[in-house]
Every structure is written in C-alpha cells, then in structure tokens.
C-alpha cells in the first residue's frame, strides 16, 4: 500500500481536483470558460485531496440542510466530486478520503452526509444507505389532457434564464419540503447556472403564481431526436410545486407547448400523481425507477431524536457503526421520539441499513426479510414499520 497524506486543497489546486474527478468518470477536463463558471460552485475549504506526492484522489462537500419526516431541517453535508486516480485505485485512498470527511463532519456537528452514487456498491461500506428513490416517466403531449376537474387557479409566467436565476431560488426556499428534500445553497444555484449556460439547447423557466404569490416553478429545454429530427422531446430539468394548483398549472402549460411530441420527466417522486391529473392515465408511461440520494447518519442520536414517528408500540434498536463508533448502541424509539437506552434490543442493524429506513423509503420488515436487520422480537418489526412510515414518499429532487 502506498503512503499518502490528506489535506484541504488550496484554491489554486481545485482545477486539478476537478480534472482528476472528471477523468475518473471518463469525461474530458473543463475548458477555461467552463472552469471559470464551475469554480464558483466550490465551497471554500470544502475540497480535500490525497497526495502521493502528487494529487491521487479528491472529494468535496458543501453545507446545506436536510428535511426529515415531521419537517425538521438539520445540518447536512452534500458530498460530491469523489474520485481516485486510475493508477491508485484499490489501495485505500477512497477509504481514507471518506474517513477524513466523516471525521470532519462529526467534529462540525453535521448530522447527515448526502451523495448521489455513481456505482451502487461503493458507499455502503462507509455507512451510506439508499434513502430516496425516483421514477422517470414520459407523457404523450399530443394525446394527454388534464381531466376536467383539475385545479385551474393561478397564472404562469415564462422567464428567460437570467430572470429565472433570480426568481427560482426564492420560490424554492418558500416551499414546504417533503422528507429528503434539502436546502439549495448558493453554490448549487451556481452549478445549475453553469449547466444551463453550457447547454446546447436554450433552457426555459416557468413560474406559477397562486393567490399568495409564486408557489412553483419548472425549467426545461426542447431537443430533437438525432434519429428522428422532426420528433421533439421536452426534457423537464427541474420542477417543484408547493400546491396541487401549482402542479396542475405547470403541467397545463407544458402540455400546451407547441412542436413537442413527448414530455420526459426525469427523477420525479415515486408518488407524484401525474396519472391522476390526466383524463387518460395511459398517456403517461413509467420509463424507469432508480436510486436517488444516499444518506449517511453522522450523528445518530440527533438524527433519531429529530424526526417524527408513527403511532405504535416502542421499539428498541441496536445500531452498529464501525467508522463512527460513538453512534453505536441501543435506542428506544417511540411515537414521542428516540433516545439512548440500556434496554435489550429487539432489532439489530448497521448504520447503513438505518439510513435506508430513516426517511421511510424502505420498510423495516422488508429490510429484515432481506437479511439486513437481525430480528429478536418479530412483533418489533411490525411496530417499526409504523414508527418509520411516512405520509409521502421521500424524495430530494436536487442533483449535484
């Protein structure tokens, strides 16, 4: 194994880290114009590197907040830009970077870490669990119609990109957030601006104005299929609606965009009611269901105490966390909250599995059936399903 050191990168080292990360994804390095914009999406002091003696691995993060069941918002770190140079993989570099990051997060009282995984098997080793999922669907623009009773209040405003970058962050900040949604700090909006400005097709934005002001927005672009140049897809980039009327209003506009054959909605909530909005639900087809955010509970006691639980008998769970052993131990979970306890555990699981159950995406009984939870009291699994259940599906909708 090579000897290497890990430290925070200086500003003049960030472009090299970006090039290394892009190379790990088999993507060319940024040109000067692209890097000038991309550099604005780096949080100062948020990027670390492994050196041997040159840069051989990197990871970066930014600060945000995660919404948990019940509506509480807790400090989280968004992890991205993780890569190891091809000639230094499988030598402990990634583990060292992940451990250094998590140690820093714990020292700064960060409750959660959050990432999108390029490969599914990688991050469970470090305590990250698949915590939110999505579905992507397509709508036949020519044949789809909203049903007659669909909400029809409010107005739509079409914005150019510069204006959208001023308006949309404020609309997003005022939304009521479902479990799994996160705040969007300025570095994220800079990232989205960079993506939009380098897009080959112009990105459009619409805002829905309800009786109390702006309450939803969507961004999209229209692209022709290379094999069929006269067939146009409207690609939905981003959409958030704070009310049912806003959701219906945004879709009413999208379905009215001319010279479009199909609307492609990527990475939407599992329970988004597009089928119920249409007069013929078969005009919408599910293209895929995939994994969205992987969450790591950095502070298990604080995370368990912060979320809302369903009404069921108390359950004692024992959590194991090899990387952050201070999280380990037994917790008594009740409808009123969670706290450490000396009582014997009815369920035993690791911190990765706890992350999968925490936002309500996976039922404890399903996790137990798959061999991810050790069951000492079968009745506890039934109660845990209710305790960890949520009214709406967890979803983030924020990509980075």
Image: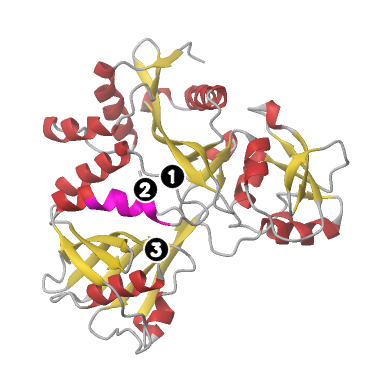
Residue 345 horizontal side relative to residue 25, left or right: right
Note whether 317 is above or below 136 in the view shown. above
192 lies above or below 150: above
Task: Find residue 399 and name its label.
Answer: 2
Where is residue 275? Give x, y as percent: 42, 79
The span from disc 1 to disc 3 (Cα, nearest Å) is: 25 Å
User: Label 1 vs label 2: CA separation?
Assistant: 8 Å
Q: Which type of secondary structure does the marked residue at label 3 adopt?
A: loop
Picture residue at 51% right of the left edge, 27% below the top: 98
Count residues near mark 3 (Cα–Cα under 10 Å), then give few for <14, some for 14-19, many for 20+. Answer: some
On whether residue 169 falls in the magenta region, the answer is: yes
Which residue does the image show at 31% across and 15% down from the upper left?
10
Reading the image, the residue beneath label 1 is 116
Q: Secondary structure at mark 2?
A: loop
Residue at screen point 39% across, 17% down: 8
- Asked if disc 1 and disc 2 are in contact, CB closer than 8 Å, the reply is yes
* Residue identified by numbered label 3: 242
Residue extent of the magenta highlight? 167-175
Instruction: Locate the C terminus and report the quarter of the image it occupies.
Output: top left
Residue 397: x %, y % from top left: 40, 54
Pick whichever, 40 or 115, lies toward us.
40
Would residue 393 appear left or right of 83 to someone viewing this image?
A: right
> Going by the image, does 377 lie left or right of 127?
right
Along the line of sight, the residue nearer the viewer: 241 or 389: 241
């Amino acid at each position: 194994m090579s000897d290497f050191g890990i430290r925070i990168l200086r500003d003049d080292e960030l472009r090299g880290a970006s090039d290394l990360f892009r190379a790990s994804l088999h993507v060319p390095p940024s040109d000067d114009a692209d890097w000038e914009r991309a550099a604005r999406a780096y949080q100062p002091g948020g990027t670390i590197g492994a050196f041997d003696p040159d840069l051989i691995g990197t990871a970066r993060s930014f600060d945000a907040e995660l919404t948990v069941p019940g509506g509480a918002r807790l400090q989280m770190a968004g992890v991205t830009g993780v890569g190891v140079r091809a000639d230094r993989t499988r030598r402990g570099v990634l583990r060292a970077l992940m451990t250094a990051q998590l140690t820093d997060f714990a020292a700064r009282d960060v409750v959660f870490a959050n990432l999108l995984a390029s490969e599914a098997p990688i991050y469970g080793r470090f305590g990250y669990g698949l915590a939110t999922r999505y579905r992507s669907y397509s709508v036949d623009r020519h044949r789809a119609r909203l049903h007659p009773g669909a909400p029809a209040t409010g107005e739509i405003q079409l914005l150019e990109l510069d204006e959208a970058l001023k308006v949309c962050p404020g609309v997003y900040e005022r939304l009521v957030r479902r479990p799994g949604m996160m705040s969007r700090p300025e570095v994220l909006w800079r990232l989205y601006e960079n993506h939009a400005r380098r897009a080959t097709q112009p990105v459009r934005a619409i805002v829905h104005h309800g009786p109390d002001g702006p309450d939803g927005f969507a961004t999209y672009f229209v692209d022709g299929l290379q094999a069929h140049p006269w067939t146009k897809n409207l690609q939905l980039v981003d959409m958030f609606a704070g009310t049912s009327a806003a959701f219906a209003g945004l879709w009413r506009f999208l379905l009215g965009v001319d010279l479009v054959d199909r609307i492609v909605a990527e990475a939407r909530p599992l329970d988004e009611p597009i089928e119920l909005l249409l007069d013929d639900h078969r005009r919408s087809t599910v293209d895929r269901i995939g994994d969205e955010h992987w969450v790591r509970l950095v502070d298990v006691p604080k995370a368990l105490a912060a979320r809302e639980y369903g009404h069921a008998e108390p359950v004692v769970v024992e959590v194991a966390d090899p990387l952050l052993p201070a999280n380990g131990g037994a917790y008594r979970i009740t409808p009123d909250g969670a706290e450490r306890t000396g009582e014997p555990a009815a369920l035993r699981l690791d911190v990765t599995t706890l992350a999968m159950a925490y936002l309500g995406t996976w039922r404890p009984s399903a996790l137990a059936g798959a061999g991810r939870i050790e069951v000492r009291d079968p009745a506890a699994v039934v109660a845990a399903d209710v305790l960890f259940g949520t009214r709406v599906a967890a979803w983030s909708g924020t990509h980075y």
